[in-house]
Structure formats: C-alpha cells, structure tokens
Image (tube, grey):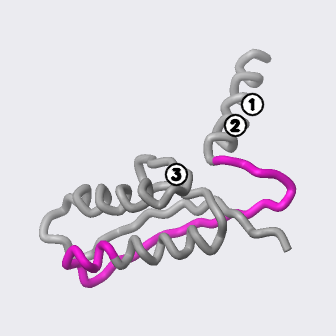
C-alpha cells in the first residue's frame, strides 16, 4: 500500500489572546512547522504543509498543543487538505500552473 501524502493548508487561530495581535503565537507555530522537516509555505493567511498524511496530521496536533502551552485556552484551526494519487505536486507547483495559464491568457490579448 502506498503511503498517502497530502497538502494541508492550515490557518491556526488562538482565541482569547491579551491583544489583537497573534504574530507571537504564529511565529511559534511556524518555528515548529519548519523544525518538523516537512515542506511548507507560509502565506498571509496561514501555512501550506506538504507530507505524509499521518505526519502532517500529527504536526497539526502539536501546533495546537504548543499554543495551549503558551497559555491560550482555546485554539481554532481552519484546515483544507488535498490528496492526489496520480502525481506528486508541491504547493509551488500548483501556483506555477495557474501563473503559466495566466501568462498564456495575456499573450492571446
């Protein structure tokens, strides 16, 4: 059986922080993601994590645990997960395909 890989886009939201800014919590989360060894891409509304399903899901649980350890009693995450079995595709690959199509659209003008 082939090990299922995925792309998980996660937006982790600490609830009940002392100030409106959550960048300290997100920096801690991003540090754990980068230390995990899984490929990831940080963006303005979250992070896309690429890797084996079990490892990605375990990491997401660790991210929640870390924010709780920082004194936050409630953590909410919005997660979109995609899988493919026909080919390997990175987050950058997905963006590059759309960018290439946009260039072709512009060339036809």
Q: Are marks 3 and 1 in contact (CB under 8 Å)?
A: no
Q: Residue at x 39, y 71 (%)?
A: 63
> How far apart are the alpha carbons under marks 3 and 1?
24 Å
In the rendered structure, the answer to whether residue 65 lies left or right of residue 36 reads left
> How far apart are the alpha carbons under marks 2 and 1?
5 Å
Residue 80 colored in magenta in the image: yes
Where is mark 2, residue-wise?
98
N-terminal of the two: label 3 or label 1?
Answer: 3
Where is mark 3, residue-wise?
40
Residue 38 in the image, given as x and y percentages of width and height: 54, 56
Towards the viewer: 93 or 54: 54
Towards the viewer: 68 or 54: 54
Residue 41 colored in magenta in the image: no
> How far apart are the alpha carbons under marks 3 and 2?
19 Å
N-terminal of the two: label 3 or label 2?
Answer: 3
Q: Image quadrant of residue 29? A: bottom left
Q: Residue at x 76, y 23 (%)?
A: 104
Towards the viewer: 92 or 79: 92
* Secondary structure of residue under mark 3: strand
Q: Which region is colored magenta?
A: 66-90
Towards the viewer: 75 or 5: 5
Where is mark 1, residue-wise?
101
Q: Image quadrant of residue 62? A: bottom left
Count neighbours of disc 2 (C-alpha within 10 A) and say few if under 14, some if 14 to 19, many if 20 or more.
Answer: few
* Secondary structure of residue under mark 2: helix
Q: Are marks 2 and 1 in contact (CB under 8 Å)?
A: yes
* Secondary structure of residue under mark 1: helix
């Amino acid at each position: 059986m082939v090990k299922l890989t995925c792309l998980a886009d996660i937006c982790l939201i600490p609830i009940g922080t002392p100030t409106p800014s959550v960048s300290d919590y997100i920096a801690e989360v991003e540090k754990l993601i980068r230390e995990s060894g899984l490929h990831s891409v940080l963006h303005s509304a979250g992070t896309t994590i690429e890797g084996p399903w079990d490892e990605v899901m375990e990491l997401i649980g660790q991210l929640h645990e870390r924010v709780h350890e920082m004194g936050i009693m409630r953590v909410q995450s919005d997660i979109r997960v995609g899988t493919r079995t026909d080919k390997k595709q990175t987050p950058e690959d997905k963006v590059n395909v759309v960018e290439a199509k946009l260039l072709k659209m512009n060339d036809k003008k």
